Amino acid sequence: METYRGVIERYREWLDVPDHLQVISLLEGNTPLIPMPRLAEELGGGFDLWVKFEGMNPTGSFKDRGMTVAISEAVGRGVKAVICASTGNTAASAAAYASRAGRRAIVIIPQGKVAAGKLAGAIAYGADVIQIDGSFDDALNLVVEISQKHPIGLVNSLNPYRLEGQKTAAFEICDVLQGAPDWLCLPVGNAGNITSYWMGFRQYHQARQSGLPKLLGVQAEGAAPLVLGHAVEHPETVATAIRIGRPARGEQALQAAEESGGKIIAVSDDQILQMQRRLALHGLWVEPASAAGLAGLAQEIRQQRLNLKGKRVVAVCTGHGLKDPDIIVRQFSSPKIVKPELRSLEEIILGEVSHE
Ligand SMILES: *Cc1c(COP(=O)(O)O)cnc(C)c1O
């Protein structure tokens, strides 16, 4: 088998990218599609369920798929610095790929609203991290203006090459399942990812009749502009990766969901955290936003709005749980401390077992 060289080399013929591309890769993509038969049973059964675990990308989220293309294009064009606004994962990814290319990354984040692992990542990868006393949406407006005034490359998902790269996740799913699933469920924030998946599935279907999934896009109740039909001034949710009130690709996302025969819905923070916990009890620790897609699926099944009999469902888990350790630490008490003695330990272990 050929050695794996990242999403650009793997799917280049399917990507609309310019010749000046200079490939900068950390071997992103090729993430596991994990069968979840026991979780499918818990949700009602009768269908096949897989999780596309995007937390296994080099910086821990799907953002790497788009970033490899955006940075490769910017570097090939001679750009010396890139800039982005971010709820966290884009910042970490931009920082890693810019550093990989020996370029400068400037990331603007909303103060106090970025999960610890993402902020740490952006700093560790060497970005110039600037916090603003405002929202993600404010940050995005500012970086767009700066990139128009100065020779600094914009790598937010307004950058079309981000979407080109993110299409590759749809290709991978079709390649592994030998066709599209019946449903794809995923979280929706700025709406670049759902837009990319739809582009990818359509492109493969046109060329190979691989079929088209229905899209179930899921927002958090406190940040659900696409469900409400209007912008949300002060979005709030524990799922910081989708804490966005004015999605840049909102129109395209709504159109994609409708064309596919699917929809965009909202779930509560409680539902998101419950699904995060449930997934962890199946061995998958994802960050809160990543559990939103499955939380939405569970809600639709509970309300009997979906007929999944014999269907194939893929849930995209967009980022790794390690990105947001605080959310776990806050919800659970810290582990007990005992004396380093056999008896004390046995008391606790056997005591706990006998309570079950
Ligand atoms: C960016 C991100 C999202 C939202 O993706 P959009 O393309 O903005 O809709 C969801 N989950 C995680 C972990 C993310 O990093």
Image: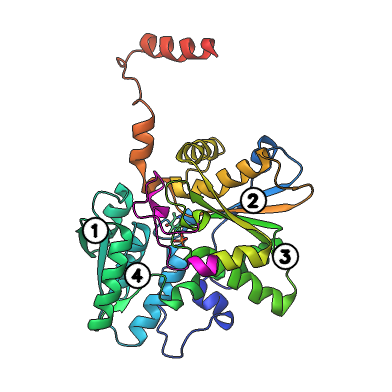
Residue 138 higher or lower than 163, as above or below? above
Task: Please state the horizontal and vertical placement of residue 75, each as a whole percent of the image.
Answer: 33, 82
The residue identified by callout 2 is 50
Disc 3 crowd rating (10 Å Cα; few below 14, some 14-19, many 20+) is: few
Three-letter amino acid code of the residue under disc 2: Trp
Between the C-alphas of marks 4 and 2, the distance is: 29 Å
Amino acid carrying mark 3 in the image: Gln
- What's the distance in space between the residues labelled 2 and 1, CA to CA? 33 Å
Number of other residues with Cα within 10 Å of mark 1, as a class: few under 14, some 14 to 19, many 20 or more: some
Most foreground residue, 307 or 333: 307
Residue underneath mark 1:
123
Question: Quadrant location of residue 52?
Answer: bottom right
Ranked by sequence position, the earlier of labels 4 and 2 is 2
> Is 173 displayed left or right of 47 in the figure?
left
User: What's the amino acid at mark 4?
Assistant: Tyr
Dot 2 or dot 3, earlier in sequence: 2
